[in-house]
Amino acid sequence: MWKNLTASGSKGSQKVYYYYHCKSSCGFRQSAELTNNLFVEELKKYEFLPSVQKILQNILLTAYKKYNNKADDRRKRIISEIETYNAKIALTREKLLAEKIEDEDYMIIKAQSKQKIEILENELHARLVATRNPEKVDDRLNKAHYQLYLTYHYYTNQVV
């Protein structure tokens, strides 16, 4: 089970000792120095050669573009469905004007179609907000790698 930890310092006779701890009733307390060293060792496992980094970045970008293409297909289908419902409303209106259907039938068909259009438009909007530009993904991958690089060097006290 995961628990939130808090950091604090405890003043000894010669220096301040830092710890990570849970709430006092739990009793968990771990030396911050030991924990930080273990974290650095874990970070070292994620340092890749530049050639491997480029391959991993290409794999991630390819997978993202494949996902994005599927999302584009769904967006196109949603737009097509919206157009179909709008056409249905227009056709039903023409039938109403030609007195081929009753006012009540027209209102029911229009209300049902408008409701479905609203649902589809909400889905379309959510998909547009969630989808990113593939070129920006490449930039974000570079930034993420750089942040990991900086974090690693910060915790290993290496000069960047």
Image (cartoon, rainbow, N blue to C red):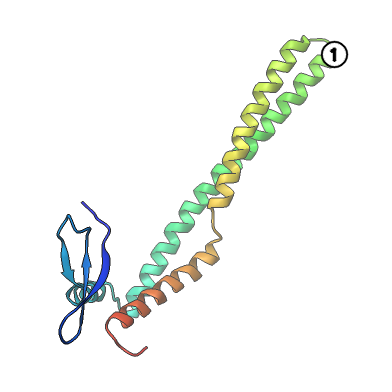
In the image, what residue occupies the spot 16% across and 68% down? 30
**Residue 44 spot, x, y in % from top left:** 24, 76
Q: Is residue 158 left or right of residue 65?
A: left
**Residue 31 spot, x, y in % from top left:** 17, 73
Q: Dot 1 corresponds to which residue?
A: 98
Of residue 73 and residue 110, the one placed in the foreground of this image is 110
**Residue 40 spot, x, y in % from top left:** 24, 76
Instruction: Answer above or below: position of 63 versus 52.
Output: above
Q: Residue furthest front?
A: 13
Q: Is residue 88 left or right of residue 136?
A: right
Q: Quadrant of residue 43?
A: bottom left
Which amino acid, by three-letter code, is at mark 1? Answer: Ala
Tally of numbered tags: 1
Q: Quadrant of residue 154?
A: bottom left
Instruction: Answer above or below: position of 57 versus 71.
Output: below
In the image, what residue occupies the spot 85% across and 13% down? 98
In the image, what residue occupies the spot 41% across and 67% down? 58
Of residue 68 and residue 21, the one placed in the foreground of this image is 21
Q: Quadrant of the C terminus?
A: bottom left
Q: Quadrant of residue 36?
A: bottom left
In the image, what residue occupies the spot 67% across and 30% down? 84
Q: Is residue 77 left or right of residue 145?
A: right
Q: Which element type, helix, strand or loop, lies under badge 1? A: loop
